[in-house]
Image: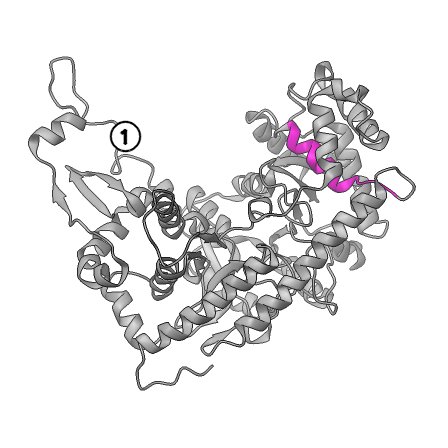
Amino acid sequence: MFRLQTIGRGYLCSGILEQCSSEFTTKTLRHLSSVWKQSRDIEVEGVKSLSTAEASAVMPKDENGRIRDRILTLETMSPLVKAVEYAVRGPIVIKAGEIERELNQGIKKPFTEVIRANIGDAHAMGQKPITFLRQVVALSTFPELLESPSFPEDAKNRARRILQDCGGNSLGSYSASQGLEIIRENIATYLEHRDNGIPADPNNIYLTTGASDGIMSILKLLVTGDGLSRTGVMIPIPQYPLYSAAISELGAVQVNYYLDEDNCWALDVSELHRALSSARKYCTPKVLCIINPGNPTGQVQSRKCIEDVIHFAYEEKLFILSDEVYQDNIYSPDCQFHSFKKVLFEMGPEYFNNVELASFHSTSKGYIGECGFRGGFMEVVNMDPDVRTQMIKLLSVRLCPPVSGQVAMDVVVNPPQPGEQSFEQFAKEKKTVLRELARKARLTEEILNSVPGIKCNPVQGAMYAFPRIFIPPKAIQEAKALGMAPDMFYCLQLLEETGICVVPGSGFGQRNGTYHFRMTILPPVEKLKLLLTKVKEFHINFLQQYASSESTSR
């Protein structure tokens, strides 16, 4: 059931509207009853005022029983927070949770389960943990297990080294704000190996609470000014909503540059020039964000493209943020991951000694998929030493990132090596995960491209497909009458009729007149096949339901 009741200026919401903005609710509720009630079997209560007695029961009162205003209301709270949107956990996901509760209560639906394809949460989708990582974390968390013969010696050795670097030899102690020194040293060794010997300094490495924490920390340092001097942040469109949310929260200016969908979501430097030139009329662009491999688009940038981007940033004096959390997720045999730092170094000292770069990695993606540990790191090169001091001060405010997440990150960068006891099992598990992901990437692309009115670019890397969908004019009109983006309307119907939860492309950004959705490729193969078959059937029925004289061809 959808319900919205008003109490003065505030709202009491339930169901899907529980966490939605008031703008969404007031626009949508006026139309839901007449348009969707029959097809969705949804009971809708219109907007209504509570009775005086009902309002009195929920509003705060003073000691004399008089109703008093709350200090914190929608009107008095930070407008920057209200501007934040995060589509990956937005209204669609809230509705999916409501449907799951209804299924658990025995309410009949046209499906028996909700398939959550909205987020890249590997373990929630059934991926098994990497054994060695869990062993090292377990040993570090409960050192008494170091005496157990059930654990391999290479895992024990890593745990002992980590615990020696912890205060009181306990994972429960704070680490340095920058992270445990032994782990930063291991990360530096990993980066040198990844980048063919290019040196990495542990002092330039910072453990973070997932990659998101690092990205937010760097942006906090960069965002300044007002009016024309306000910091502009260039982000790819489509983008991962973390970036737009962070920009809104910090009050920076979002500067969109569009990826080329017709060229497999490639990054065109001429588009960077266009976006930069336009933005300089209303802000001061300082930051260029890159996501490689791409989220939600799944493209992998070529070395030539990275060179062009670095040259552009050098010429235009932009600080590069390189989001590289999917660097292990490369599926196309024609693609290879190149780190921005490696290419920057190989371009020569003029670039390597001047271009300011922060790159990010995480335990949440790759073949590990340990989202809940919130482990990550960033490497920052060419930062002014005085600014580095300020950044360490900023990081010290949150004391330290979770030490268990740091341990998980250590296993990512310091896995078992050939000749060690755990190497064969580790290598087998890693290979199995990446092989299955590559298989699912091909399967997703093939099935989606077999559907009239859907076009999906190759999923070269990362964990998602971002297909373009044709939405008939009649459906667009109906969506607009409901105050919804057309692809939100599409995805809500998909959820209601099939139980499949995907995220509308409007939550990531897209060119005007185009519509998409993002889905993860993480479900097990058989469930993924079921998901894709349901999407195919739904889309064909959707086109027929809203058929018009216009062609549905791609």
Lateral position of residue 387 relative to residue 255, left or right: right
Lateral position of residue 180 relative to residue 551, left or right: right
Q: How many marks?
A: 1
Would you say the magenta stretch is mainly helix, strand or loop? helix
Q: Secondary structure at mark 1?
A: loop
Question: x%, y% of residue 31?
Answer: 19, 59
Residue 291: quadrant of the picture: bottom right
**Is 215 placed above or below 177 here?**
below
Asked whether the viewer can see residue 201, the reply is: no
Lateral position of residue 198 relative to residue 486, left or right: right
Residue 136: quadrant of the picture: top right
- Where does label 1 land, which residue? 72
Relative depth, front residue between 326 and 425:
425
Question: x%, y% of residue 398?
Answer: 55, 27
Q: Which residues are magenta?
A: 403-417
The colour scheme is one colour
Lateral position of residue 426 relative to residue 250, left or right: right
Relative depth, front residue between 343 and 157:
157
Q: Is residue 411 magenta?
A: yes
Name the residue at 13% across, 23% down.
Answer: 67
Question: x%, y% of residue 278?
Answer: 46, 65
Crowd class of label 1 (few under 14; some 14 to 19; many from 20; radius 10 Å): few
**Is 152 placed above or below 548 here?**
above
Relative depth, front residue between 312 and 214:
214
Relative depth, front residue between 480 and 322:
480
Asked whether the viewer can see residue 444, the reply is: yes
